[in-house]
Image (spheres, rainbow, N blue to C red):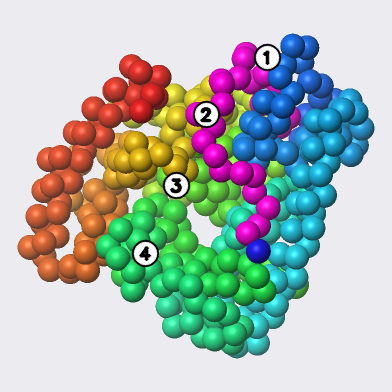
Amino acid sequence: MDGNVGHTSETLSLRPLSRIELDALVAIMPSWLHQRAWDIPEGADADLLWEYIDRQGLGGALGALAVANLMPACELSELAKARYFSNMLYCEQARNTCRKILATARKHDIPIVNFKGPVLAQQAYADPGIRAFADLDLCARSRADVFNLLDALGAKVDEDSDHEGIVRRMRAPGSVLATFDGWEIEIRYPTREATDPMLDLLYRYDYGSNPAEDDCFASPDPAWHLVLLVLHLSWYHYYSRFVWFLDLAALVSRFRNQMDFEWVLQESKRLHATNLIALASCFCRKNIDPSFPEFPPNSAAWNYRFLCLVTDPRTISSEKFSLHQRTRRGLLYILWLRAIRFFLLADPPPRYLPDCPPERWMIATIVIGGRSTGPVMRLAVGMVVSLLFRPLARLSAQIARMTGGES
C-alpha cells in the first residue's frame, strides 16, 4: 500500500498561481478550521487550482467543506469529496495496522511511540478524511527493540540504514524500513548521537508518558508532537507544504488548554529552533488562526530573513525549496539544501564552536555516515564544517533572498 498522497510531478512545470488563486488556496485552511464557506474565485483556473490543492495536501480539507455544503457543487467539489473519502478509507486501514502493531508491542513489552501519519490524523483532526499520508512512523528506544518488534509482527525488513551506503546513513541514521499489512513502516531508534534537532527530540522521548487506554496508537503528548511537527516541516522539508501548517493549527485548536507552551518555547531554545517555531507560528496566526500562540522571533539572526522567505505563501506554493525535486538539477539542489540546513535553519549561537548544536549535528552526520569515530577524523570534519559549510550557508541565504529563492 502506497498511502494516499497526491502525485509528485514537479509543481514547477505548472504555471504559477495568480494572486486570487493563491489566496483561494490559502483560504482553504481557515475555512476548514473555522467551518466557513469557501468558493472558487471568479476567473480562477479550477483545474490548475486543484493540482495545487492536492499537491499541497489540502484536498481532504476541501472535501470536508464540500461534504458540509460549505462550497458550491461543481467538478472541483467532486474531486475534493473523492479525496476526502479516499483519505477516510486509507486512515481506517492504517488504524487497523497500528492497532496490531501496538498490541504486539505491548505483548512483548516493547515501548514505542507513533508520530505524524494516522496518529496525527486522529489527534489533530479527529476526522480521518482530512489528512493524507504515505507511511507509518514509529520510534523505539533501541535497535534491538526495533528488530524484536518486527520479528514478532512477521514484518518484512526492506532497508536497514546501518547496512546501507554512506549517503543513506547520513540521511537517515538509525532508521529501519519494513512492510507490514501492505504498509511501509519507518521505525527510528537512537544512534550514538543525534544528527539533527528532530532526532534529538525523538531520542529523549519519555515512553512512560503514552496513554495506556489508547488501543490504536502510542500517542505522544500534544505539546511534544507540536515541537516534532515544526522540526519535521522545517528541518526535513523547508516548510514546503501548506498542510503541515494546518497540522499545527488543528493540533493547537484541539489541545490548547492542555499544552504547556512554556515547555514548547524552552524545548525550542534547547534545540536551537526558536525561529523555526516563531515563523511557523507567524504563518498560522496570519493565514489560519489569529489565536494561535505567538512565539517571539529573533529578527537579528543572520538567517531570519531567509526563514521569512521560505515561509512566504508564494514561496511555499512554488515549491522552490521542496526536497522532492525529480530533475538532475533539482536533485543537486536538494543535496545542497540538505548539506547546509544545519546553519540555514538553526538559531545561530553567539559563537560557532565545535560543540555548539549546528556544528555538532553536522559533524555527527558526517562521522556516523562515514563510520569513523576517531578524534582526528572528527577534528578534521569539524574544520571543514567551520571553514567551508558555514560560510557557504550564509552566502546561499543571501543569494536566495536576492533571487527570491530561485535555484
Q: CA distance from mark 3 to mark 1?
A: 29 Å
Mark 3 burial class by Cα count in 10 Å: few <14, some 14-19, many 20+: some
Eye-nearest disc, 4 or 1: 1
For the record, the magenta segment spans: 2-29
Which is more N-terminal, label 3 or label 4?
4
Residue 275 is tagged as none
Callout 2 touching callout 3 (CB < 8 Å): no
Instruction: Name the kind of residue labelled 3 in the image.
Output: Tyr
Q: Secondary structure at mark 2?
A: helix
Which badge, 4 or 1, comes first in the chain's sequence? Answer: 1
Q: CA distance from mark 2 to mark 3?
A: 23 Å
154 or 141: nearer the eye? 154
Q: Are marks 4 and 2 in contact (CB under 8 Å)?
A: no
Tell me where residue 41 appears, x and y as whole percent: 77, 15
Dot 4 falls on a residue whose secondary structure is loop
Residue drawn at (14%, 54%), measured in percent from left and top? 381
Residue kind at label 1, given as amino acid type: Ile
| Label ID, residue 173 | 4
Q: Earlier in the sequence, mark 1 or mark 2?
A: 2
At mark 1, the secondary structure is helix
Question: Residue 200 lies in magenta, yes or no?
Answer: no
User: Label 1, on which residue?
Assistant: 20
Give how far across and how far down residue 95 sits, in percent: 74, 66
What amino acid type should be assigned to the residue bearing mark 2? Answer: Ser
Which residue corresponds to mark 3? 236
